[in-house]
Image (tube, helix red, strand yellow):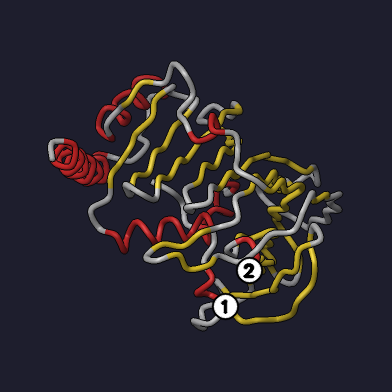
Amino acid sequence: MSTPRKLRLSRGSSIPLVIMAVTALVAVEAAGQAPVSEGTREAYRPFTAKYLWTYIDDQGATINFSGKFHRTADGSFSQIEEMEGPRRERGTVQYIVNIADRSWTSARSYTHTSTTVVYLDDRKFQNMVSEVAGNCAILEDGSYRRVGESELLGIKVIEMESKVGRDTVLRDSIAPELGCFVLQHLLVDHGEVRAIEQVTQITLGEPDPDALHVPAGYAEASPLEFEARWQQLFGREYYGAAQAKRLELEYQQGKARQRQRNNR
């Protein structure tokens, strides 16, 4: 249901990008700490981060999308992000991840629906979590190249770089103290920054509990139900028939497992 961090920059693919220069004013309220082992799980320093995505169009105007990321001490999180809808209207997409039961909820303001999938495949679930919340493995696994160290928001970051094409590079500023959450994410094309995700504020401590719940008034919809609602509202596919069926199977399998757990 989520979009991998490397591909999230394609969200603005309908917005042609040219040279961009962004100056971010940032503030931090406290420093973090690295995740530590507690038995069979990790404990994270809980925090709330505000961030801004910035793109630029052919005429040189910047286009901004804001977001918030909330993480609890067990690694569960909620991400709420502005998006551009099918008719260029602004809306929000929210992802809520519960680590304990391996559930992933997607909630979209365009349809006022949410879809919660309980994942049976732990590896797939963990990969999805890492793509959004950060992954310390990339510091050592060779997928990124370490290019330096610096500070953002008063927090030490390790600067990592990965080529995604002959002339395109991703540069991430990763904060090990915050479970390798990315404080700055750059898309660089032909040596020029074309898009940037910049954390603008971090507040440490447990996030607002309401941030980890679906907004009031949203109805639960399976992938096939969501696909039908999307087509009814906008006259186009969201997943497409084949993918919607695959997601529906995964959704129903997760629901069956959840019922089994509840009946024990």
Horizontally, is 120 left or right of 214 in the view?
Answer: left
Residue 253's place in the image compared with 228, above or below, is below
Q: Residue 84: percent from the left, percent from the top? A: 58, 34
Q: Earlier in the sequence, mark 1 or mark 2?
A: 1
Q: In the rendered image, which residue does mark 2 sit on?
A: 176
SS for callout 1: helix
Q: Amino acid at mark 2?
A: Pro
Label 1–label 2 contact, CB within 8 A: yes
Tell me the crowding category of disc 2: few under 14, some 14 to 19, or many 20 or more residues within 10 angstroms, Cα based.
Answer: many
Q: Residue 120: percent from the left, percent from the top? A: 23, 53
Camera-nearest label, 1 or 2:
2
The quadrant of the image that shows the C terminus is: top left
Residue 119's place in the image compared with 237, above or below, is below
Q: Amino acid at mark 1?
A: Leu
Q: Residue 48: percent from the left, percent from the top? A: 65, 44
Which residue is located at x 47 percent, y 57 percent?
4
Mark 1–mark 2 distance (CA, rounded to whole Å): 9 Å
Which residue is located at x 40 percent, y 45 percent?
98
Number of the label disc, if any, that sits on residue 259: none
User: Splitting the image into 4 quarters, where does residue 222 fall?
Assistant: top left
Nearest the eye: 46 or 252: 46
Nearest the eye: 97 or 144: 97
Q: In the rendered image, which residue does mark 1 sit on?
A: 139
Identify the residue at the far front of this view. Answer: 39
